[in-house]
Image: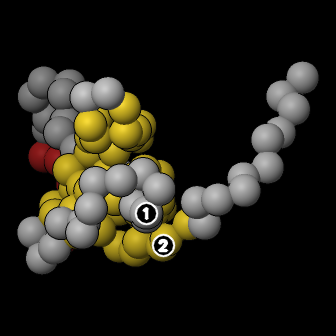
Amino acid sequence: MVDSFDVATMKIVKVIWTDCEKHEDGWLTEDEIVRYIDLPLKIMHSIGWLLCADDRWVIIAQSAGNDRDGFTASEILKIPRAMVDNMVTLPNGNVAILDCE
């Protein structure tokens, strides 16, 4: 877990991880099963405030803040450590604002 839940000192990370999946199209034939087995899993890229990184999980929050209620966070993603391929700390200061027009 992080030392302090304070957005001024918390790390922002990019987590690259292999997602799992569930086939949802009903019954499969043997040939369809063989084709499904060979399909690669999706590689996901998630960015957020690092809440926890231990041997069990990497947990990040998309949004976090310190306000009248203390520390709050939302859109929390808990990724099993075995699914994490890489994690990189991102700079969390002086971010350039892009004009999207």
Q: Could you say where residue 10 lies in the image, as x and y percent from the top left?
A: 40, 61
The residue pinned by badge 1 equals 9
In this rendering, position of residue 55 left or right of residue 73: left
The residue pinned by badge 2 equals 88
Q: Considering depth in this image, is 43 or 23 the residue closer to the camera?
A: 43
- Look at 90% across and 23% down and name the residue there: 101
- Look at 37% across and 32% down and name the residue there: 67
Identity of the amino acid at label 1? Answer: Thr
Q: Could you say where residue 58 lies in the image, as x and y percent from the top left?
A: 24, 62
- Look at 64% across and 59% down and name the residue there: 93
Q: Quadrant of the N terminus?
A: bottom left
Q: 10 Å neighbourhood of mark 2: few (<14), some, or many (≥20)?
A: few
Identity of the amino acid at label 2? Answer: Val
Which comes before the other along the chain, label 1 or label 2? 1
Secondary structure under badge 2? strand
56 vs 39: above or below? below
In this rendering, position of residue 97 left or right of residue 3: right
